[in-house]
Image: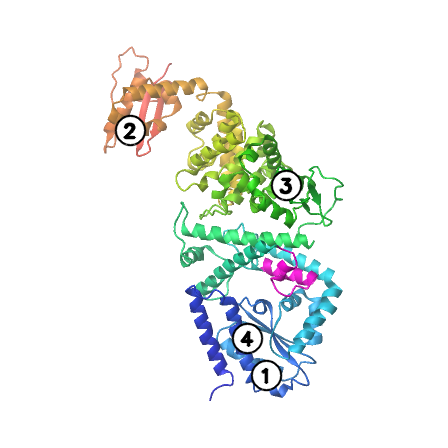
Amino acid sequence: MLRPHEPATRSLQERVTELTGRFLRGRQPDFLKQHARALDDYFEQAFETSMVGPRLEINKNPYAIIALGGYGREEQCIHSDVDLLFLFGKRVPDGAEELIREMIYPLWDMGLDVGHATRSLKECLALAAKDLNVLTPILDARFICGASMLFSELMGQLRERVIRKHAGRIVEELIGATRARHAQYGDSAYLLEPHLKEGQGGLRDYHTMLWFARLQHDLRQPRDLEYLGLISHDEFGSLGEALTFVWEVRNHLHHLCGRKTDRLHFENQIKLAERFRYREASGQQPVEQFLGDLHARMDQIKQQHVALRRELNVDPGRRRRRPLPAKLAGEGLEVSPVGLLSFAGPEAILKRPELLVRIFEESLALELPLSAEAKRLVREFCHLVDPAFRSAPEIVRAFERILLSPRAAAALGDMLTTGFLGAFLPAYAGITHRIQYDEYHLYPVDKHLIQTVQVIHDLAGPGGASEPLFARIYREIKTKRLLVWAALLHDIGKGESEGDHSLSGAELCRGILTEKGFPATEVETVAFLVREHLYLIKTATRRDIHDEETAVLCARRIQDPERLKLLYLLTVADSIATGPAAWNDWTAHLLREFFLKVINTLERGELASEEAVATIERKREAVFAAASRPEREAFELLFPSLSPRYLLAVPAPAIVEHARLFGRLGARPAAWTVTPSADEHPHRDHLRQGPAGADGEPRRGVHAEQHQHPERPGLHLAQPHGP
């Protein structure tokens, strides 16, 4: 004999299976809504065929079955919870539990995660007034079946007796809950393992937008965000596209894991990139492109959430401590009554295009965030940022003042999201939302660069006690502005599809800074820092820093103490901004010790002076001139492994002979030459017995060299020196 709800259960199961299959084939764009509607049909059919329902006497004690939360919003993902409220007009009758068993047990048997509450109208309103976790799901409530008038009464009394009466307290609680959620789950637009729902930029930010708007404006449908003027038509469209992408990722993640899950762990990212049919392009792996698109969408949700709560004056991160200014420094700018910075109007920008950068500078100076309208206008007027604008001295100086501000990241972040940074630095287009899929980098490239700038200011300021050497060197350097430019641009070459990003980045820097009117010497300094930004950390962590020759080679390469200091500061900031895999106590110690050795070598001038470098270069030319054409390729490989001390001490012809000796080594374990010595030669004992004499005491006259060839352990030479 069939159970009363077995046909409804079988129909639901078949329909969900069909919907899921169509979604996975890309043929069910409205899957969320249709999935919710399938559940609605089940409950309506179960209500009509219920054997318990008639005994509850709905006419005397009306009851309704109400969808809550995501089910109420018709955002039903593959393994989402099904949240229900069984609402009774009077007291909850004894037979209510039997009704719930009749309707919900079949869904549990299907494997659905069904959560339910059974309350009277009075209980529901009392709990909603006290508990935010009860209130917010009801804000998204939707009637399914039963007494529709009871649902209408619930929503009406909720507005009159709860929201209007306790609006201020509820908003404060929601602000606190939002702050706590962001602290727990992090900023999903930055994290490489984002939480699709609870993180900043996740779906819960969108839900919070709806709740704030319902609390303050009685919003009924999401589209009311546009109709109420809270966001623009274009912004609503962009928000919808971003949400659709995140929901699609969430559905595929649910299906892939076979359960509800919202943290996008590394092990699932490559699989999802394959499901979304990404292909390698522009030097990026499919998974990097997929994550880049996901981060872009989540960043968009985050920005809309921030903008809306500022417009509603419910910004959980901002409580103004000082009075608003009576007058702004920039004509054409104004402050709203709730403390948001904006333009006087579009005509102000047309009259004075420099306001496009001035508004960010003023925002930092006054500690006032930009209004949503200001960000819209910046986005719409970015076409004014042409070559003449980018090279105007007053614009460049204003941008530099922002870079040198202790709170630079706040303004740079707004510049990035409004498109101004990409317009002012067109090369940023290639790195915006660009992901580096490795164990080191925590942030997308664009945000990593901004973070690097901020780390410099953090370590140079009062908060830099953990790196006292950094703060001391920062105070010593004369060209702080060049350091922050290098920080902002050091990975700009990652937007190029091929080649070493350090080399391509240096070339891009030359073009960028030349356009902005920098002197040639400053252009070359920044290009040098970008080209060499990985050199110190790689050398410190991969070479023997206690070998004097390592410090000498580095000193030869850098040559100038000021450049070394700049490079050290950039290296520390870059490593910290990369993440804990790139910066820890061990790497900090190695880099600090290596820097001190190199700066000591440069300041002493031994083996790294301009004269020594010139001598080595002349010998190099002489060696290559003496070599035959076939030998030159081998010499090219060998020469960088020869130490400065050896190159300064040994004549060019001898270097040629030693290199040829190495070439004859082949597969043999050793090769040597014997140099006869007359009895009166002052170093005969050294040559016969090596670095120790007949008495066992060390001899200072023999300089032993060991050179590590890139392919094989290299030359072992004894070179006589003076007595």
How far separated are the C-alphas under marks 3 and 2? 60 Å
| Residue 188 sits above or below residue 619 on the image | below
Residue type, mark 4 in image: Asp
Q: Nearer the viewer, mark 3 or mark 4?
A: 3
Question: Which residue occupies the extreme top position in the image?
Answer: 680
Question: Is tag 1's residue or tag 3's residue first in the polypeptide sequence?
Answer: 1
Q: Are marks 1 and 3 in contact (CB under 8 Å)?
A: no
Residue type, mark 3 in image: Ile
Mark 3 highlights which residue? 349
Q: Residue at x 53, y 79 (%)?
A: 105
Residue nearest the observer in this picture, 435 or 517: 517
Residue type, mark 1 in image: Glu
Mark 4 highlights which residue? 40
Can residue 188 be seen? no
Q: Are marks 1 and 2 in contact (CB under 8 Å)?
A: no
> Callout 2: 10 Å neighbours few (<14), some, many (20+)?
few
> Callout 1: 10 Å neighbours few (<14), some, many (20+)?
few
Question: Is tag 4's residue or tag 1's residue first in the polypeptide sequence?
Answer: 4
Q: Residue at x 63, y 52 (%)?
A: 307
Q: Are marks 4 and 1 in contact (CB under 8 Å)?
A: no
